[in-house]
Image (cartoon, helix red, strand yellow):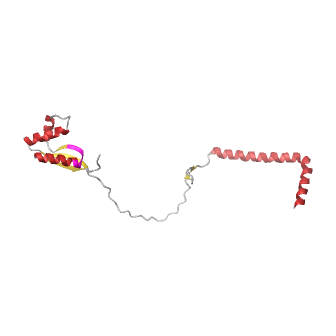
Amino acid sequence: MSNGRRGKLVLQDVPSGQVEKKVVRLLLQFATSASVEQLTQKVRRTPYTISNDIEAEKAALIVGAFEKFGAMAAFVPHATEEPVAEQFIPVESEPRFVVRPPPVSRKSTYGATIQPPSPKSSTRNIVMFLIFILMMLSFGFLAWQLWPVVHGGVQGLVSYLKQLF
């Protein structure tokens, strides 16, 4: 497939008689499913579009063949709409001081989004804090219960540490 220009091929004027027969014979080579009568009627009602999408090089060959027989044909390239470049003029707006809340989720440095804590995680944090408090109370109770047994050993350890320092 070529990247050349494409367009449509239009048969504009065909004189009647021998030229018409030659043009119909040429068209029969390209249109295998059409009959001679159908092509003759279409050629008599000019302008007749032969192809809506044809390459410029192929159209030039076919137009040359039609002109050789005495008929007139033309290649009409497709209109390529190129975007019109408009000059960008920045608009300066008045400075506004607006305090907005931070966005709900942001990208972290690792690419994962940071999501607000769910209600389940805050409940879990409260439960963990209460378990920590209970553990501290149970260690305190254990120390209070074992103090008469461990008291002599702790006093000996403290006096030994005092001698070192």
Q: Is residue 146 left or right of residue 49?
A: right
Quadrant of the image containing the C terminus:
bottom right
Tally of marks: 0
Task: Give the residues drawn in magenta, as a range.
Answer: 50-57
Q: Nearer the viewer, residue 99 or 108?
A: 108
Query: Residue 7 location, x and y as percent?
Result: 24, 48
Task: From this view, report whether residue 117 is shown above or below residue 92.
Answer: above
Q: Is residue 140 left or right of residue 122?
A: right
Query: Residue 55 location, x and y as percent?
Result: 24, 47
User: Which residue occupies the extreme left position in the image?
Assistant: 17
Q: Quadrant of residue 102?
A: bottom right
- Considering the whole magenta stretch, tell me its main secondary structure: strand
Residue 52 among magenta residues: yes
Q: Is residue 121 left or right of residue 80?
A: right
Query: Residue 111 location, x and y as percent?
Result: 55, 51
Q: Residue at x 17, y 38 (%)?
A: 28
